[in-house]
Image (cartoon, helix red, strand yellow):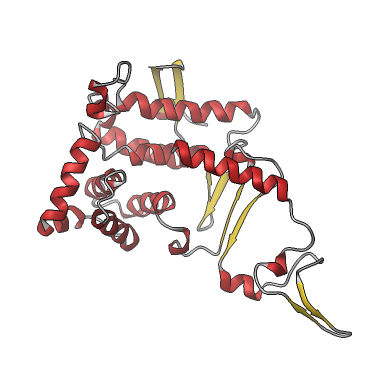
């Protein structure tokens, strides 16, 4: 169970006074925050940057924003009593299981680690300077050792993707602040890639998630499998459309994905799942 050293108590908008636990991978991310006194820095940064000057009531700090999201993550878990991972599941990554609560908080901490004083205003200016000055871009990216993260960062700069530019600043800080902690670097980079990198570039064979953990219907989900593996796998259900030809002594399976789609699929819940994905995508 999380102890006092990895628990933050704070008074937050909407939630009031809360005590938030950081465990598993989130505990290690919190160690990085404490080493850099990052929460103190974030207390001086308004979450919406210069936009806070325009909208009344939008002057909350980035510190409040991060802990509010972490508090809501715990609140969602508490809805499902009896297990700290019941509502948000877990991911098995390279043989190690990471609870969903810890992963979400890790992503919250890491993705806010690089935001600048005036958020998008400052970050957009720095991104523009990176495009105009190749030498500065090289210096900016030089600490990033992971090839996938470095390639993603270069692509983000070339696309002038100022919304995601802060991730580059976070990744750079992580490598700069952990120069001799290679295991820590590698684990943080591995978890960060799940948030940023296209699944086809992550070199995983199977990737599964369920709809009800994403505000969707129960009893339906997604199983992503590398194509070359699917091609060698036999079907595990029999029914219409999964067979191309039937002979007396042999059967030929249909092409992908039909050979795994026996009978009528769960059409209604898949449509509901699609609506849940659209909703989550729209709110960011």
Q: Position of residue 186 (x, y in %)?
A: 36, 55
Left-right relation of 43 to 245: left
* Relative height, residue 63 to residue 216 (above, below): above
Q: Which residue is located at x 63 percent, y 74 percent?
A: 231
Q: From the top left corner, tell me how far across and down residue 44 is, in percent.
A: 22, 24
Screen quadrant of the C terminus? top left
Q: Position of residue 63 (x, y in %)?
A: 32, 26
Examine the rendering and report whether any part of residue 50 can be seen: yes
Residue 128, image x and y in percent? 16, 48
Q: With 131 as the anchor, is 249 left or right in this view?
A: right
The vertical placement of 25 against 55, above or below, is below
Question: Which residue occupies the extreme right position in the image?
Answer: 248
Asked if residue 231 lies left or right of residue 191, the reply is right
In the depicted view, which residue is nearer to us: 237 or 192?
237
Q: Residue at x 65, y 42 (%)?
A: 272
How many badges with numbers are in the image? Answer: 0
């Amino acid at each position: 169970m999380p102890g006092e050293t990895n628990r933050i108590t704070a008074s937050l908008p909407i939630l009031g006074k809360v005590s938030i636990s950081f465990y598993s991978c989130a505990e290690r991310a919190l160690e990085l925050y404490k080493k850099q006194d990052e929460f103190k820095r974030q207390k001086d940064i308004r979450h919406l940057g210069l936009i806070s000057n325009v909208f009344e009531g939008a002057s909350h700090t980035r510190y409040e924003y991060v802990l509010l999201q972490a508090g809501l993550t715990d609140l969602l878990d508490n809805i499902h009593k009896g297990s700290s991972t019941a509502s948000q599941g877990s991911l098995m990554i390279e043989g190690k299981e990471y609870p969903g609560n810890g992963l979400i908080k890790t992503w919250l901490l890491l993705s806010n680690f690089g935001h600048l004083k005036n958020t998008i205003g400052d970050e957009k200016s720095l991104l523009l300077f990176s495009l105009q000055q190749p030498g500065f871009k090289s210096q900016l990216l030089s600490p990033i050792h992971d090839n996938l993260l470095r390639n993603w960062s270069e692509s983000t700069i070339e696309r002038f993707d100022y919304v995601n530019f802060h991730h580059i600043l976070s990744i750079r800080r992580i490598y700069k602040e952990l120069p001799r902690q290679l295991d820590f670097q590698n684990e943080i980079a591995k978890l960060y890639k799940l948030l940023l990198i296209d699944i086809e570039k992550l070199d995983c064979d199977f990737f599964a998630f369920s709809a009800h953990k994403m505000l969707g219907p129960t009893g339906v989900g997604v199983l992503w499998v590398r194509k070359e593996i699917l091609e060698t796998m036999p079907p595990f259900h029999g029914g219409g459309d999964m067979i191309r030809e039937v002979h007396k002594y042999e059967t030929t399976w249909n092409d992908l994905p039909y050979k795994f789609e026996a009978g009528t699929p769960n059409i209604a819940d898949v449509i509901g799942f699609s609506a849940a994905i659209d909703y989550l995508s729209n709110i960011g």
